Amino acid sequence: MKSFLFISLISLLLIPIDAQSKYTYIRVAGSGWGEGSVICKIINTTKKETGMRCGASTVERVEALHSNEVDFIQIKISEADNHKIMRSLFIYPIEPGRIVVTRSNHDEDSVYILTKQIHKYFENYLNMVGAKPIDKKAMMNVGSIPLHKGAERFYREIGYLK
């Protein structure tokens, strides 16, 4: 089963993305296949609703975000503090001090949709990553890293921010 999952995830990364594609494709990196694949499972199962597809990566280097290898990455808050171009989306609920970030210039609509979907399926997300239940509002406790405009737009829309 694990090899099937691994092959399935690799095949997602090999799908050619052309101008005719009806989906926006994002790449998510996390700790191993865990975090990235959980986020991608939520996005890929709601692709008709969101218009997005997702591929997971095991890349855990901040440089991968800067070089456009990945669009979103889960990192320690202390790693993000040194990078002025990063913007946060939400916390990684298993490990305190870890958050999901992207580049400040990443497409606002993609960030909005990703944040909205994780919020919408928050209990599933917590179960899939093995986290204890926490309040949904806690997902925006990202420390000193500014929220991305897309995440901020979503949190304002649902009343978490004024």
Image (cartoon, rainbow, N blue to C red):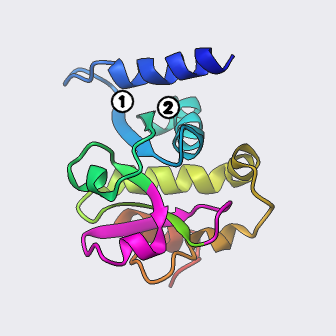
- Near-viewer residue (115 or 66): 66
Residues shaded magenta: 74-96
Q: Nearer the viewer, residue 67 or 126?
A: 67
**What's the CA distance linking mark 1 and mark 2?**
8 Å
Which residue is under mark 1?
Answer: 23
Magenta residue check for 19: no
Determine the residue positioned at 23% across, 47% down: 68
N-terminal of the pair, mark 1 or mark 2, is 1
Is residue 154 shown to the viewer in this render? no
Whether residue 134 is visible: yes
Q: Residue furthest right?
A: 133
Residue drawn at x 43%, y 44% as measured from the top left: 28
Q: Position of residue 81 (x, y in %)?
A: 36, 78
* Residue at x 76%, y 67% (from the top left corner): 134
Check contact, mark 1 vs mark 2: CB within 8 A.
Answer: yes
Which element type, helix, strand or loop, lies under badge 1?
A: loop
Q: Quadrant of residue 150?
A: bottom left
The quarter of the picture where residue 140 lies is bottom right
Q: Secondary structure at mark 2?
A: helix
